[in-house]
Image: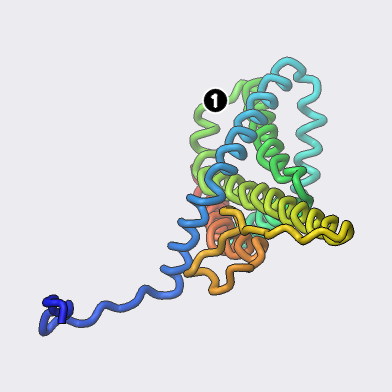
Amino acid sequence: MDGKSPVMEPLGTAPRRAPGLLVRLYRAEAEAWRKHYRRYFKYAARALGLGFVIGVLYFLIRPQQEKKALDFVIRSLKDISVGGTPIALALTLFYHNARASAVAVVAGWVPFLFLPILDPLLNGGVIGLLVSVSKHQGLDVPRLILTKILPHGVFELTAVLYATSLGLYLSETTGKKALAAWRRKRSLRRGEAPPVLQVPDFLETYPERSASRDESPAVNVLRSFVLVVLPLLLVAAFVEGFITPAL
């Protein structure tokens, strides 16, 4: 006996329940955000701001290019019908934005090129284009931003930045894993002892997400996409479909 009595629950109190699956998943997601995605999110936010500034300045200086750029944006959104019911509009917007975000994440499979950064850059440019067009048409730009862009944009742009973060993380981790595999293969060809590969911090898995230490980063990215990006896009779509038209 060490003189210490075991800790016991007070009489009459129910035992603590273990957190549910959803709680564990989002706790793990918060850990992934702190360890991996947060720094990429900052890069994505800077790209969004840079695209916006470039878009505003370019079209304010060269207004003759506005119509051509606006026609291109409208053609890219031709599958979105604004004449239907709000629920149809919301679901169409959700599908369109989810598809675009998925493409941004998948672009992260290309190692070290960080192609997903183009997504917030282009989104910022489009917002800059809309601001420039509104200004040249004599519209109230601050009111336009507050009523037509900001309500759903808070959720949609956050989802875009988060998806970009996932893609950038995937691009770096895929590249580093490929580089490590190439070095190992080169060592084997030379007849050297293969290097001892230590798993870097960015490839560590989370005990609440997987019991396997060798889980692919792609699995983590997929979970993050489902847990964070898709819900944000769904909220944004319903705000844009039901609330924004009334503002």
Q: State the residue position of label 1.
A: 140
Packing grade of label 1 (10 A; few <14, some 14-19, many >=20) is few
- Which quadrant would residue 70 be assigned to in this image? top right
On screen, residue 22 versus residue 149, left or right, reads left
Query: Would residue 181 be visible to someone looking at this image?
Result: yes
Quarter of the image where the N terminus is located: bottom left
Secondary structure of the residue carrying numbered label 1: loop
| Residue in the image at 63% along x and 63% along y | 222
Between 43 and 130, the one lying in front of the other is 43
At x 69% / y 32%, what residue is drawn?
125
> Hey, what amino acid is under mark 1?
Asp
The furthest residue to the front: 192
Q: Position of residue 16 (x, y in %)?
A: 26, 77
User: 17 left or right of 198?
Assistant: left
Q: Residue furthest top?
A: 61
Which sits in the foreground, 83 or 23?
23
- Residue 176 rendering spot, x and y as whole percentages: 71, 51
